[in-house]
Image (tube, rainbow, N blue to C red):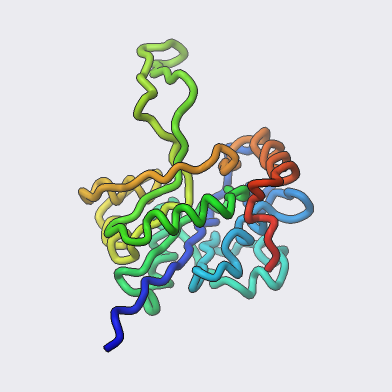
Amino acid sequence: MSGPAAARHWVVIPAAGRGARIGAERPKQYLPLHGEAVLAHTLRCFVGHPAVSGIVVVLAPGDPHWTTLEPALRAAVTTVAGGAERADSVRCGLAALAPGAAADDWVLVHDAARPCLRRDDLERLLTTLADDPVGGILAVPVRDTMKRAAADAITATVPRADLWHAQTPQMFRFGLLRAALANVAEVTDEAQAVEHAGHRVRLVEGHVDNLKITHPEDLALAAWYLATAREAAPCASATV
């Protein structure tokens, strides 16, 4: 008698944001980075990965930049239109996966503007959470002294011992994440929705070079990481 089918892994990349904070002429996921768009590097982290069953990229309605990406990358994913907020776009991505994804399958949500994900960090996330009933996220411990402020003055120094910087991918059971996002209005990441639903979200330590491009200096730093990483090479260096 055969056992239950192994859980598959799906990827949702919300890429409908405008990236207004970076002050560029186009959304940050389409800014040039080593000769191609930031989003192209992000996609290479997952396209062709043996554990990934499918990838959904959630685009802004009428996105004029998507067709500038390499045809082989575009052909390897499914695209759907997103919503006004990140959570809306993730819901759209999950809805697109729903006909083929089982409730116990895994879904990894990854920021479109986070192009320096290391392959070993991704593998550690997949392995560490393989038997977890809920899921977890990549994160790094806070290293700097943290201050709470009002206007431009410090009101308190916050102990950093238990503080972490949340990253992506954020990896959860498909049915659980879909239900959690259906019951919240606005969240800043998927983990917040899962926490709100009463579940325990695990932390898997990653690396600081898995940065999210938000400000102009982040783009230069991402370029440096991609150019200089050798021993722990980002999976953005993989080919389609």
Q: Position of residue 4 (x, y in %)?
A: 29, 79
Name above or below for residue 150 compared with residue 67. above
Q: Is residue 153 visible?
A: yes
Q: Measured from the top left, where is residue 107 in percent x and y?
A: 41, 63
- Residue reaching furthest to the bottom: 1
Which residue is the extreme one toward the front?
1
Residue drawn at (63%, 61%) of the image: 44
Q: Quadrant of residue 6?
A: bottom left
Viewer can see residue 89: no
Looking at the picture, how far across and down is residue 89, in whole percent? 44, 58
- Who's the residue at 33% across and 47% down the image? 202
Task: Decide if residue 197 is on the left or right side of residue 7.
Answer: left
Q: Choose between 202 and 94: the one closer to the eye.
A: 202
Residues 234 and 12: in front is 234
Query: Hey, which quadrant is residue 61 in on the image?
Result: bottom right
* 150 shown above or below 51: above
Q: Is residue 227 above or below residue 58?
A: above
Residue beneath the point at 48% across and 49% down: 168
Task: Please give the name of the residue rendered at 70% of the width and 49% of the height, measured from the top-left corner.
Answer: 31
Q: 232 or 30, which lies in front? A: 232
Q: Quadrant of the N terminus?
A: bottom left
Q: Give the side of residue 92 with respect to residue 77, left or right.
A: left
